[in-house]
Image (cartoon, rainbow, N blue to C red):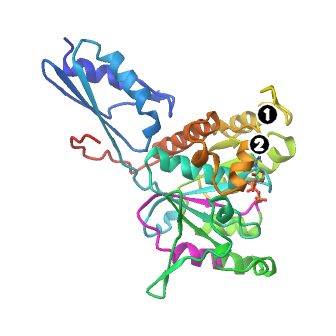
Amino acid sequence: MLTDQDILSALALLLDENTNASYGHVWEVDSDKSTVNVRLALPYYANQNRNVIERQVAEVINDGRTVNIHFQNQVVSASVQNNLPGLKGVKNVIAVASGKGGVGKSTTSANLALAMAREGAKVGILDADIYGPSQGMMMGFSADTRPGVREDKFFVPPVAHGIQVMSMAFLTTKETPVAWRGPMVTGALMQILTQTDWEDLDYLFIDMPPGTGDIQLTLSQKVPVAGSVIVTTPQDIALLDARRGIEMFRKVNIPVLGVVENMSTHICSNCGHQESIFGEEGGQTLAEEYGVDVLGKLPLSLSIRKQADTGSPTVASAPESDIANIYQSIARKLGATLASKTETFAMPTIGMSDD
Ligand SMILES: Nc1ncnc2c1ncn2[C@@H]1O[C@H](COP(=O)(O)OP(=O)(O)OP(=O)(O)O)[C@@H](O)[C@H]1O
């Protein structure tokens, strides 16, 4: 029979597929003749990964005893650029950006937020894409949706699919924002961001305006961002713009957590044939050039478009689909990558629970 120490040593070597490294010393073990209790405390959520972990553990403890695994996930706040004060009710802000419009940044933000929530985290989205706010529509809100108001001071974000959502579109008419100049836009966004009553969020995704102009730069300097994600399509022109996005975040000391390659291949809805119509390995080349990871690749798919454009993005409407699984994997990697960048990371104290 294995000793607890044998088991701990073997568990510490197991590979975490979300980090491509060993889990390390995040395990606790106690056992008797018939049962082994294993506790795993992770600094990110990975509920959709539990069966993989259970299989890994079962292979280590293969001595006929019953194995109980208790999972505990606790997200802590990562440091932010220039020690900006954090946002009340939000542990980590993740900016989702693209160098250019139309590459699927909003679709990716919505699906990643939903995927992160499915992994177990509490999540919000701020639609900062002021000139083309689409989160309201993508998350299924009607056009006349308005946030609640508390104490005449705070917006209470409407909730859809379990996600707290705020958008300039909830406060303006269609015509308003186009007439605004840059400083008005950033001022209004900062106000929405800080005056929203975010409730206990592990992650707030900010769907940034496309591009790398003044508005984007100002937001990146003023909003306390823990990490950013760059969405790009594989065409050279989009990649060129994505480079500018990475460089902008570097300049303001915001870590780039990775690149998501969208519309990576086209899968024919009739025959299933897969083709790289926008070129191959573009995101990979970009990621290598800047020493960041490709967190995942999404195909150009009719279902992604239809589901996002009708208010129930793929992760919500087809959670068991192959495409939803890609978003889940990206969400876990994102959480894990952010946690690994947390300088002040301290392991939570864990207690036994059947959670
Ligand atoms: N992988 C995909 N396959 C098919 N359609 C997609 C995919 N990703 C996004 N789309 C569709 O492409 C259109 C543009 O997507 P989206 O609004 O997310 O882009 P964006 O980068 O946020 O654009 P902008 O910054 O201009 O608002 C939408 O109709 C969306 O449904």
Q: Position of residue 55 (x, y in %)?
A: 39, 22
Q: Classify mark 1 as within 8 Å of ligand 1 or not, answering yes or no.
A: no
Q: Would you place residue 21 above or below residue 316 in this image?
A: above
Q: Where is residue 335 in the image (x, y as percent from the top left)?
A: 50, 45
Q: Position of residue 276 (x, y in %)?
A: 82, 31
- Find numbered disc 2 in the image and state the secondary structure of the residue it sits on: helix
- Which residue does the image show at 75% across and 69% down from the upper left? 214
Residue 264 in view, yes or no: yes
- Which residue does the image show at 80% across and 25% down from the upper left? 273
Viewer-side residue, 131 vs 337: 131
Q: Earlier in the sequence, mark 1 or mark 2?
A: 1
Q: Is residue 253 left or right of residue 339?
A: right
Which mark is drawn over residue 96?
A: none
Viewer-side residue, 298 vs 321: 321
- Which residue does the image show at 43% across and 49% down from the upper left? 343
Q: Distance between the residues labelled 1 and 2?
A: 8 Å
Viewer-side residue, 112 vs 288: 112
Q: Is residue 120 left or right of residue 141?
A: left
The residue under label 1 is: 269
Instruction: State the extent of the magenta-drawn residues as a range.
Output: 188-212
Q: Mark 2, residues whose alpha carbon is within 10 Å: few (<14), some, or many (≥20)?
A: few
Q: Is residue 105 left or right of residue 87?
A: right
Q: Are the residues tagged 1 and 2 within 8 Å (C-beta)?
A: yes
The residue under label 2 is: 302
**Labels in figure, total:** 2
- Find numbered disc 1 in the image and state the secondary structure of the residue it sits on: loop
Q: Classify mark 2 as within 8 Å of ligand 1 or not, answering yes or no.
A: yes
Image-quadrant location for residue 168: bottom right
Taking the view exactly as shown, the residue that stands out farthest to the bottom is: 152
